[in-house]
């Protein structure tokens, strides 16, 4: 059973930075971050293979966000820099134990979700 607990959200001025953390328990093959803004659908933000290697990002965050993991701590991170008001959303850590493609176009495969952490970017 995969369990995911996010932390690190908050409010920040545009141009600022935040780092989200996700405590992961259970076996996972692919992990990532998704977000959902008010009135909008789910968007895959960044994904990575568990244990390192391939990462993939949404075009909207490339060059600003970095996904990483600390295997010793079983923690997934999302470093968010140069934040924009349009980054405001609930951010969810997600994962799947199933082997398969791991990219932002296929985040529907990440069937285990945390409860989310709110990120608000003020203009």
Image (cartoon, rainbow, N blue to C red):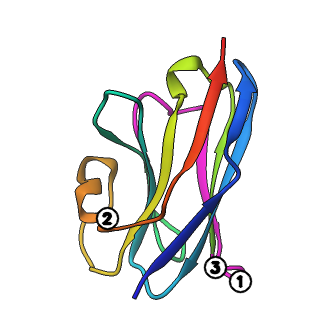
Dot placed on the residue nearer the N-terminal end, 2 or 1 = 1
Q: What residue is at 34 percent from the left and 81 percent from the top?
A: 97
Mark 1 element type: loop
Q: What residue is at 39 percent from the left and 88 percent from the top?
A: 1
> Which residue is identified by label 2?
110
Magenta stretch encompasses residue 84: no
**How many C-alpha atoms fall within 10 Å of the one at disc 3: few (<14), some, or many (≥20)?**
some
Question: Which residue is nearer to you in this view: 11 or 14?
Answer: 11
Q: Name above or below for residue 94 compared with residue 81.
A: below
Q: Position of residue 92 (x, y in %)?
A: 47, 53
Q: Is residue 118 left or right of residue 19?
A: left
Q: Gap in Å between the C-alphas at discs 3 and 2?
A: 17 Å
Residue 60 place in picture, x, y as percent: 44, 27
Q: Is residue 106 above or below residue 85?
A: below
- What is the C-alpha distance between the residues marked 1 and 3? 6 Å
Percent of width and height locating residue 106: 24, 54
- Residue at the spot 71% in from the left edge and 31% down from the top edge: 11
Q: Which mark is residue 74?
A: 3
- Looking at the image, do the residues carrying marks 1 and 3 touch, with CB atoms under 8 Å apart? yes
Q: Residues within 10 Å of mark 2 (few under 14, many from 20)?
A: many
Image marks 2 and 1: residues in contact by CB distance under 8 Å: no
Could you tell me which residue is drawn at 61 percent across and 37 percent down? 119
Q: Which residue is mark 1?
A: 72
Q: Is residue 82 above or below residue 30?
A: above
- Identify whether 14 is placed above or below 59: above
First to last magenta residue range: 57-74
SS at circle 3: loop
Residue 102 located left or right of residue 46: left
Q: Earlier in the sequence, mark 3 or mark 2?
A: 3
Q: CA distance from mark 2 to mark 1?
A: 22 Å
């Amino acid at each position: 059973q995969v369990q995911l607990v996010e932390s690190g959200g908050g409010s920040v001025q545009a141009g600022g930075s935040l780092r989200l953390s996700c405590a992961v328990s259970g076996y996972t093959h692919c992990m990532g971050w998704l977000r959902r803004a008010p009135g909008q659908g789910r968007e895959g933000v960044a994904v990575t293979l568990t244990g390192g290697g391939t990462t993939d990002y949404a075009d909207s965050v490339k060059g600003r966000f970095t996904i990483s993991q600390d295997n010793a701590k079983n923690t997934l991170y999302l470093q968010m820099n140069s934040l924009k008001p349009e980054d405001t959303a609930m951010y969810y850590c997600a994962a799947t134990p199933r082997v398969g493609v791991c990219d932002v176009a296929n985040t529907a495969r990440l069937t285990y979700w945390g409860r989310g952490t709110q990120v608000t970017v003020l203009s």
